[in-house]
Amino acid sequence: MGTCDSTMGLRNTLIVMALLLSVSTIPFSGAASLKSHAFFNETGELPCHFPNTQNLSLDELVIFWQDQNKLVLYELFKGQEKPNNVHPKYIGRTSFDQDSWTLRLHNVQIKDTGSYQCFIHHKRSQGLISIHQMSSDLIVLANFSQPEISLIANQTEKPNIINLTCSSMQGYPEPQGMYVNLTTKNSTITYDAVMKKYQNNITELYNVSISVSFPIPPETNVSIICVLQLEPRKIILSLPCNIDAKSPVPSPPVPDHILWIAAVLVTVVIVCGMVFLTLKKRKKQQPGPSNECEIIKVEGKESEQTEKRTPRT
């Protein structure tokens, strides 16, 4: 009995191998490959879209999917799954939906991006006949985290220069760019920078960041937003980083001793001025030698001279 089972299993394996060798020579239908999108670590769908116009049962069919490297993802032989023919990288990761003729690939990784084909053969007494085949492209995406702004302490002597970094993590595919918008009440200025990127060798996900330095006007409020450009019309915005306008720096208070010195000086100046004005006023009011005295003295001298000149009788 055990020998019979082994012989049957070997026969099935040989049949599948023969099918794999023959499918490369079978022309595909003219329809273009369907594109299917899936997110990292989630489930992707690989449709087969079998019309089954003859209403065939699964017991009459041989169904399998293979990737672009012709590695088998899943096999259903006359209604029975055949994991022995599945490549190790796909074991335990697939499930077949009989209602929609779709294979679901679980725990999708970036490396699963590529083309897949499904093949359906009718098992008849005279052998296997290919009755349907379809190709689909699986595109795996990973959402980048929301960009995050981190301010860096200013190492320069210029107080109005701001330094910051912006980073986003764990995304795929590689984004197109990253930049910063500085918005004031009247304008918006864009600052570009060289985007640094790091790709994990295992997950193939990207981490990206930029470093930017630019002046900010101190007299007005500003809002800074980091923009991650994924596609021409698809972006992710950071939360705004708001910086309020700086208040005018008040003049330092005058020390009390300086106020006292100033008051004393002012008092001294006032007193000296008053004294000077008083002395000047008194000097103006003091009388000098009168003209009458001078006339009397002159007349006295003239009388004496007259007496000397007049002869005595």
Image (cartoon, grey):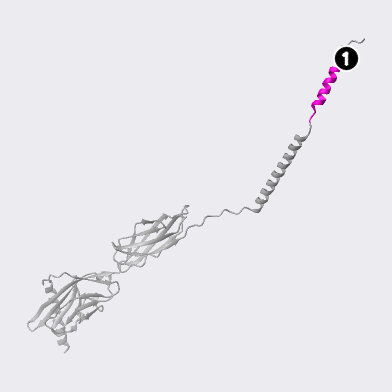
Q: Position of residue 163 (x, y in %)?
A: 42, 57
Q: Using a 10 Å C-alpha cutoff, classify the residue at mark 1 as few (fewer than 14 neighbours), some (14 to 19) or many (20 or more).
A: few
In terms of depth relative to the viewer, which is nearer, 292 or 153?
Answer: 292
Membership of 296 in magenta stretch: yes
Counting labels gives: 1
Locate the N terminus and report the quarter of the image it occupies.
bottom left
- Front-lying residue, 217 or 39: 217
The extreme bottom residue here reads 1
Secondary structure of residue under mark 1: helix
Quadrant of the drawing holding the C terminus: top right
Q: Position of residue 266 (x, y in %)?
A: 68, 46
Q: Quadrant of residue 141?
A: bottom left
Location of mark 1 (residue): 307
Q: Is residue 310 left or right of residue 82?
A: right
Outermost residue, right side: 313
The answer to whether 294 is drawn above or below residue 110 in the figure is: above
Depth order, front residue of 58/29: 29
Q: Residue at the spot x=42%, y=62% of the render?
A: 241
Residue lying at 16% horizontally and 79% vertically, measured from the top left: 63
The quarter holding residue 201 reads bottom left
Q: Is residue 146 magenta?
A: no
Magenta residues, start to end: 288-304
